[in-house]
Image (cartoon, rainbow, N blue to C red):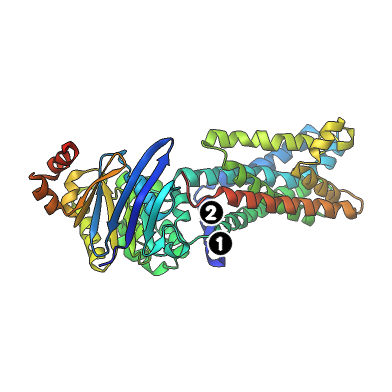
Amino acid sequence: MEASVVVSDLRVVRDGTEALRGVSLEVFPGRVTGLLGPSGSGKTTLMRSIVGVQCVNRGDVRVLGRAAGDPALRHVVGYMTQAPSVYSDLTVRENLRFFARILEAAGSVERALATVSLDGHADQVVQTLSGGERARVSLAVALLGEPEVLVLDEPTVGLDPVLRRDLWEMFHQLAARGATVLVSSHVMDEADRCDELVLLRDGRVLAQESPHALRSETGTADLDAAFLALIERP
Amino acid sequence: MSPRITGAVARRVLSQLRRDPRTVALLIGVPTLLVVLLHEVFAGRNEIFQHIGGPLLGMFPFVSMFLVSSITMLRERVSGTLERLMSLPLGRLDLLVGYAIAFALVAAVQASVVSLVALELLGLDTHRPFAVVLLAIGNAVLGMALGLFVSAFARTEFQAVQFMPAFVLPQILLCGLIVARDQMAGWLEVVSAFLPLTYAYDALARVTGPGALGARFWVDVTVTVSVTFVALAFGAATLRRQTP
């Protein structure tokens, strides 16, 4: 299988500090890949680089065979930023309709609303929603159209357990249809829901493997312990 | 550029304004009140009201749209929606022209209401009132273009608001509205020749005045339109697909 995202020796300096110090990794379609690491480890910078909105100092990022940010990719890469990037003075549906018009995907608005369980709030102004609901509006925008590559920056933060489980199920359904799903999280208990893990710390990739392989390799039972074992490994 | 996306942006900006009726009321109510106030202040010297009232009608939209557009674009940057838009198939001109269409429509309503009040209720005797509304719309787009451009240099709303007195008030002082340019100190007259509002004001003064428009009017219009396009181009340059 060919990787849909290929990052080679990526270096990014943000605000005078090296956010990424030579990151190389491959992300494959048909899987949910978890990007895990403590906050400040470079997850957001890496995701921004893959979407093509990050100024890059060195290295190369290719998505579906094209340079990240290539105009041809703008229709097929769905991106959810960490802070909900939607218009807080519009209703949920107005937001989705606006972004759908840009993507020529007007038909996918209702489906995206249902996917994030916001169909009951569609005509509510975003400002009046809770933090978790706003995050879901932002996620729904990323799902508009039929994105082949989904880059989701901490999409499940602050959501209730039932909804989190449903969303992870949805990520796996999208992957099963052949999409590339890259999801970041700083919560290790979400790692077990991924098919593949990329562990990031201090702007470097510590490991890239399946949760199962990671546990057996480090001889630990839970992933938090595995992460520690990797960090402390000489 | 695509008409579909440009239209989507314009519709979105108008829906945002529709959901904020207080701002709309202020946009239309404040200049109306100011014209009434001007009329009352010069109650004993009507010739002054007649002289500056007409040009002022065309300058309110410049000030309002400068402010509204710089804040709207700043919010777009701060909230992350600009970053999202830049990752979507939207051209930078789609965004700017979409804004221009929306704000031009608002300016048309604003200028029409204020002109109606001034002409019908306050007895402002302006020549070519329709041309005033047209020029007002042009000035609104000029103000918007400058506002979008300078908003790139503001990090907070406090800074963006301060750009209004910094960029707009000196232009109002120097454009010839308060003191005729040929009566200013020589260096001020030279400075004013480099400020776009000078030309916008001169066009308005000619349109609202009794005389013929003259060749200078068309120079004014050409300069104003050109500066608008240059400011839009600079504004487009401040919209980066990639940010540090």
Residue occupied by mark 2: B13
Residue A27 at x, y percent in the picture: 28, 58
Q: Chain of mark 1?
A: B
Does residue A32 appear anywhere in the picture? yes
Name the residue type under label 1: Thr
Position of A205 with respect to B127 (left or right) is left
Position of A145 with respect to A2 (left or right) is right
Considering depth in this image, is B189 or A110 the residue closer to the camera?
A: B189
**Element under label 1?**
helix
Q: Residues within 10 Å of mark 2 (few under 14, many from 20)?
A: many
Residue occupied by mark 1: B6
Position of B167 with respect to B71 (left or right) is right
**Element under label 2?**
helix
Q: Are marks 2 and 1 in contact (CB under 8 Å)?
A: no
Name the residue type under label 2: Val
Considering depth in this image, is A139 or B131 the residue closer to the camera?
A: A139
Asked if A193 appears above or below B43 in the picture, the reply is: below
Residue A141 at x, y percent in the picture: 38, 57
Q: Name the front one of labels 2 and 1.
A: 1
Q: State how far apart marks 2 and 1 are (Cα).
A: 11 Å
Quadrant of the rendered image containing residue B160: top right
Q: Residue extending furthest front? A: A234
Asked if B159 appears above or below A166 in the picture, the reply is: above
Label located before the other in sequence (2 or 1): 1
